[in-house]
Image (cartoon, grey):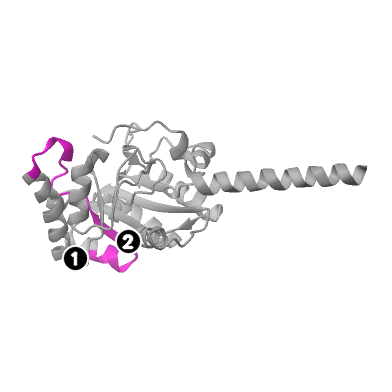
Amino acid sequence: MKKRIWLSVLAAAVVIAGGISWWASRYYVVPIIMYHHVTRLDSPQPDTVSPERFEWHMVYLKKHHFTVLPLTAFIEALQSGIPVPRKSVVITFDDGYEDNYTQAFPILKEYKFPATIFVVADSVNTKGFLTTAQMKELLANGIEIGSHTRTHAYLPDTPVDVRRTEIFDSKRRLEEETGVRVAHFAYPTGGFDEEIKEMVKQAGYDSACTTNRGYDRFNRDLHELKRVRFSDQDNRVDYLWMKLTGFYNLFRQAKNPY
């Protein structure tokens, strides 16, 4: 009798474990981390992380054995159906601020973490933003350069011809500056619609990142990839754990794409 009960419990446990595994495989999303400024401020801002806090985030990833993937490798895995390690993340930065080079890059290099910086093309070589030489050094050390349009225009509010210039010409200029193909795009403020997304594909980008905008919670559309914002306000271990579980997209509030 006891043996029969034990076998029943074991069978139930197997079924439950199988159900959990199926659920997790269906809804797990590799977190794509989004940063902007890496600098010190007198008061916290949602688009800024201090160098000390940024390093604390990187230490957390290292200590908890996360696999930090280059965005290109992650996209190639999704395209080919190759599974990635469950505790994986992708690190991205928006706008191409110079502090990404002066503050974040040394920390990324210390921990041997790749990342992608989405650069506003017309800001290159202007005060406070990356220079051509800095971008080339970043590329030589495992940091990818993506496009964030020419002028950081909010694409849903721009005419079609301006959208085309923002999307196509930014790619062309960044490739001329770096000598390397620009494969990835990020929508300014996360705003897009289906026509904009189609234009990004036509321009030759392999992927496009948004914020928490859009209707695809599970990042199955490579040109509508949701990201998870990190800042100085992420100053507790439980915040990091929650955002890096791989199920954050499932429960957080989504926004209209435009």
Amino acid beneath label 2: Ile
- Residue 123 picture location, percent across and down: 14, 50
Q: Which mark is residue 178?
A: 1
The residue under label 1 is which amino acid type? Thr
Q: Where is residue 50 shown, x and y percent of the image?
A: 37, 43
- Residue 22: give its label: none
Q: State the image quarter where residue 141 is shown.
A: bottom left
Question: Residue placed at 15% from the left, 41% from the top?
Answer: 153
Element class at badge 1:
helix
User: What's the residue at 49%, 37% (across, down)?
Assistant: 239
The relative height of residue 78 versus residue 254 in the rendered view (above or below) is below
Measure the C-alpha gap from mark 2 to mark 1. Answer: 12 Å
Determine crowd level at label 2: few under 14, some 14-19, many 20+ residues with C-alpha closer than 10 A: many
On the rendered image, what quadrant is the C terminus found in? top left
Q: Is residue 129 visible?
A: no
Q: Nearer the viewer, residue 54 or 157?
A: 157
**Toward the viewer: 44 or 146?**
146
Instruction: Identify the residue under disc 2.
Output: 143
Assess whether residue 173 is covered by the magenta stretch. Answer: no
Pinpoint residue 72: horizontal percent, then vertical percent: 34, 61
Q: Position of residue 102 (x, y in %)?
A: 29, 54
Q: Does dot 2 land on a helix, a strand or a loop?
A: strand
Magenta segment boundaries in residue numbering: 136-160
**Which residue occupies 9% across, 43% down?**
160
- Tell me if mark 1 has few (under 14), some (14-19) or many (20+) residues whose alpha carbon lies within 10 angstroms of its own: some
